[in-house]
Image (cartoon, helix red, strand yellow):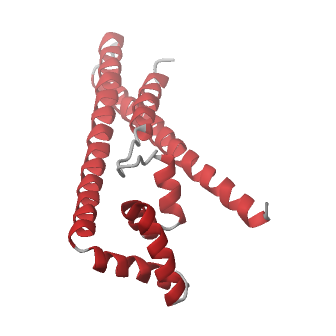
Amino acid sequence: MSIFAHYESQTNIGNKKLNWLRAAVLGANDGIVSVASIVVGVAGASGTLPFVLTAGIAGLFAGALSMGVGEYVSVSTQRDTQKALLEKERLELENFPDEEFEELASIYKNKGLSSGTAHLVARELTAHDAFAADLLAGMDHADVAFKTGCNLDKTGRSACMQPEFIDDGEGSTGHGFRFC
């Protein structure tokens, strides 16, 4: 294996882990800052331990619910948008196969292949699975790593649920840090 190939494989692995890390750091930070702000505000206003403790616990649950629901809505919106774009591409392949073939060949020409080779590649790929060939041709390395990390299935749907669980879990942990 060449050094470049090794670097590429390590980079793709690292990119998947960066999404987890980003979500964990943001969730924990949000949990700590928001609950600390609530607790400091209530402590400044009342100064009694039961009120401060109640406000902190309420902030913990409200923050966890808010982050969980927010991530769910975000991931659902991403999936719906992705589904609509994939359906649009499917319809284009059904209704305009020649134009889509030329578009596919053009993508490979723009990536540096000669016209003849680009058409040959497009022909061989579309003979096997035109939809998959069309999807993969338009992606760069980061897109492929993202789709792989999110378990893009054969229909093109993403199964990327990692950030919502991490944000929710780390946010709750972050909220809980105040009381540890």
Relative to residue 55, is residue 119 drawn left or right? right
* For residue 17, above or below residue 69: below
Q: Residue 60 at what x, y percent from top left?
A: 35, 24
Q: Residue 77 at what x, y percent from top left?
A: 25, 48
Q: Residue at x 28, y 64 (%)?
A: 89
* For residue 69, above or below residue 13: above
Q: Residue 109 at what x, y percent from top left?
A: 49, 85
Residue toward you, 158 or 56: 158
Relative to residue 22, is residue 104 drawn left or right? left
- The tally of labels here is 0
Q: Residue at x 41, y 68 (%)?
A: 126
Q: Residue at x 62, y 51 (%)?
A: 14
Relative to residue 67, is residue 151 drawn left or right? right
Relative to residue 25, is residue 1 drawn left or right? right
Q: Residue at x 30, y 38 (%)?
A: 72
Residue toward you, 148 or 61: 148
Residue toward you, 130 or 161: 130
Quarter of the image for residue 54 reads top left
User: Which residue, as the protein is rendered here, is positioned at the far bottom?
Assistant: 115
Quarter of the image for residue 86 reads bottom left
Q: Residue 104 at what x, y percent from top left?
A: 40, 76
User: The N terminus appears in which quarter of the rendering?
Assistant: bottom right
User: Which residue, as the protein is rendered here, is positioned at the far front?
Assistant: 127
User: Which residue, as the protein is rendered here, is positioned at the far top?
Assistant: 50
* For residue 57, above or below residue 123: above
